[in-house]
Amino acid sequence: MRFALDHLWQSSLFAASAWALTFALRRNHARARYVVWLAASVKFLIPFALLTAIGSAAHDRVPAPMASPPLALLNVVDAATVPFSSAHDVAGTVARTSEASGAGVIEWALFVMWLTGMLTLTTRWTARWVRLARVARRAAASTSGTDSRVLALSSRRALPVAFVETNCEPGVFGIVRPVLLWPVGVSQRLSDEQVESIVAHELCHVRWRDNASAALHMIVEALFWFHPLVWWIGARLVDERERGCDEDVLRAGRAAQDYAEGILTICEFQLASPLACVAGVTGSDLRRRITDIMRRHTGETLHGAKRSLLAAVAVVTIAAPIGVAAWRGQAGPLAIAPVARERTFDAASIKQNKNGTFGPQGRTVMSLLAPGERVRFVNVPLRQLVVSAYPGYTALQGPDWIGAPGPPSDKIPRFDVEARAAAVATHEELQMMLRALLADRFKLVLHAETKDENVYALRLARSDGKLGPALRPEAKDCESFRAPLRGTGASDPCPVDPQATRIDLGHHMARSRTLDFLATIMRIDLDRPVVNKTGLDGSYDWELKWMPRRFLEPGAVPLPGVDADAPSMFTAVQEQLGLKLAPEKDGQPFLVVDHVELPSEN
C-alpha cells in the first residue's frame, strides 16, 4: 500500500513539473508540449523504484572513491520519492507499528474496486475497437467525385482509405497498419482545398504515430482510472496532438480559411471519434483551435535555453534516483519484518554493564532468544542486540559506540538485558518483541541496504560431506516440527534449555541451532560477515573452541578462561566442525542506523 501511495505521489509530482514545463513552452510548437505530457503519462508506468534498482545494480561499476552527494540532494530525492513511507521504510525500515488485522480487508476491498474499474474500462474500449475494426473491414473503396481525390491524396503516403457509412469524423484507425476512415458523403460538403487540408491533417497523425501514443495513454487510464490527473493529462494530449497537426498543415502552406471551414463543416454534420486512439480532426478545444488557425499560429521553434532546459530536466529526472541509489548501494526494497506492537515483553530491564573487562567477571554470556518466555543478554554491545533481533543482517553501520565488528573493545558501552514475555513465545515472536524493545528504549530507527562485499563463506570442508566430531545433527529434527507452528503462537514442540546456548570469548556452545545461527555468531570474532553456504538444513548441536584473533597478535596475553593452546578460528572450524571459511565476494544485506540513543536504565 505504501509503495502504491509513493508511486502515485511521484507520478503526480512529475505531472505538476510537466505542467510547469508546458507553461514555459506555451509559445513554442505544440509537439514539444505533447512530448512533455506524454512523458508525464509514461511516468505512471515507471516507478522510481525501478530507477533506484538500476542504480543499485550499477553501483559496483562506479569508480571507488565515489563522492557522497550533498545531503540536501539526498533529502530532496527522498522527500520527492517516498513521502508516505520514509526512505528507510522503502528500503526495509523497521516500522513502528504493525498493521492492524483489518488492514488486509481494506486492501482487498480497494483491490477489488480497482480491478472492477480497470476491467470495465478495458471491456468498453475493446468493444468499441472491435466495432470499428468490423466497420473498417466492411468498408469499400469509392471512385466517384471528391472521394477519388481522397484516394489520390492518401495514396501518396501509402495510407489505405476505407469509406464508411457511419456518423464518425474522418480519422486514422489502427496502430501497426493504419487506415484512413472517411465517411461516405462528407466529401460532397467539402471543397477540394478543404479535402486536401483534412487529409493532410490525418497524414500528420500517421507520421507522428499518434495512435500508438494514444493507446499507451489508454493503458495508463485503465490502470490508474481513479486518478483525476490521468484523465487531465489525456485531455492535454488530445489538445496538443490536434494543435500540433494544425501547425503542420499551416506550415505546409494550406489556406487557413479553407482549413478552418473544413473542420467546422465536419463538426456540423458528423460525430466525434469514439476512441482516443482513433486520431480525427475535430478534437480538442475547437474555438481555440479555429482562432489559432485563422491567426496562422504555428509556434516558435524550440532552441537555445528552452532546449537545454528540457534536456536538463530529463537528465535530472532519470539520473537523480539512479545516482543516489548507486551511491547508497541499495538494491531496492529489502524485507525487514515490522516491529510487533501487538505483543511486547511483559517486563524488561536494560542496564549498562560497568565491569569493563572481558574476563570471568565480565564474560559475555547470551541466551539468544531461545523459544520460551525469557530473553537474556549479558555484557553485549548494542550491535549484538540488533544482529540478534534481525537475523540475516550480520553487518551493521552506525555510530562507533554501538560496537565495531570483530574483537570486543573496552571503549564501547555494553549492556545487560533481561526481558520476560507474558506467555511462551516462538523464536520469531521473541525476535519481533526484541525489535520493539530496541525501538522503544534505544529509539532505534534502521534501514536496510545491500552491496557486494568481502565475506567468509561457510562451506563443507570434505568432499564426502562428513562433519567434524564437535558438530552433530540434533537427535530429532526439531526444525520440521517448528516450521508449521511459526507465527501461530503455539508453544515450541522442542523446548531448548536457555543455558544450552553460550557465546563466550573463544568458546561457542549451542544445542538445537541452525547453521545460519552459527554463521551469525561467528562474525563476532571475524573482520567480515559469514554466510552459510553449506546447504545443510535442520538443527545441530555443536561446541567450538578457538583462540580469539585479538590474542594471536604478538605480545598479546590471553585472558583467564581462554584456552592458550586453542587454534585460530579458521583451524578450529575445520578440525572441530568439519567446515571451512572461504573468503569470497557476495551481495550482502546490511543495516544502517538512522537514529539511536543511549537508553535510560531501569
Image: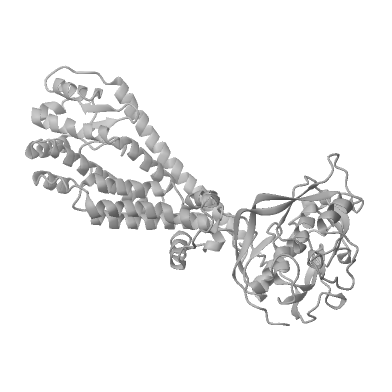
Q: Tell me where residue 573 appears, x and y as whole percent.
A: 84, 54
Q: What is the quadrant of residue 95 in the picture?
A: bottom right
Q: How is the image coloured?
A: one colour
Q: Tell me where residue 181 appears, x and y as whole percent.
A: 25, 28
Q: Is residue 132 above or below residue 578?
A: above
Viewer-side residue, 293 vs 509: 509
Looking at the image, the residue that sits furthest to the front is: 554
Viewer-side residue, 435 vs 100: 435
Q: What is the quadrant of residue 104 in the picture?
A: bottom right
Viewer-side residue, 272 vs 499: 499
Viewer-side residue, 142 vs 317: 317
Q: Tell me where residue 58 appears, x and y as whole percent.
A: 52, 49
Q: Tell me where residue 333 appears, x and y as whole percent.
A: 57, 54
Locate the C terminus and report the quarter of the image it occupies. Answer: bottom right
Q: What is the quadrant of residue 398 in the picture?
A: bottom right
Q: Is any part of residue 443 visible from this angle?
A: yes
Q: Is residue 147 above or below residue 567?
A: above
How many numbered circles does the render carry?
A: 0
Q: Is residue 170 above or below residue 47?
A: above
**Residue 147 falls left or right of residue 380:** left
Q: Is any part of residue 169 visible from this angle?
A: no
**Residue 444 falls left or right of residue 187:** right
What's the residue at 22%, 34% (across, down)?
Answer: 204
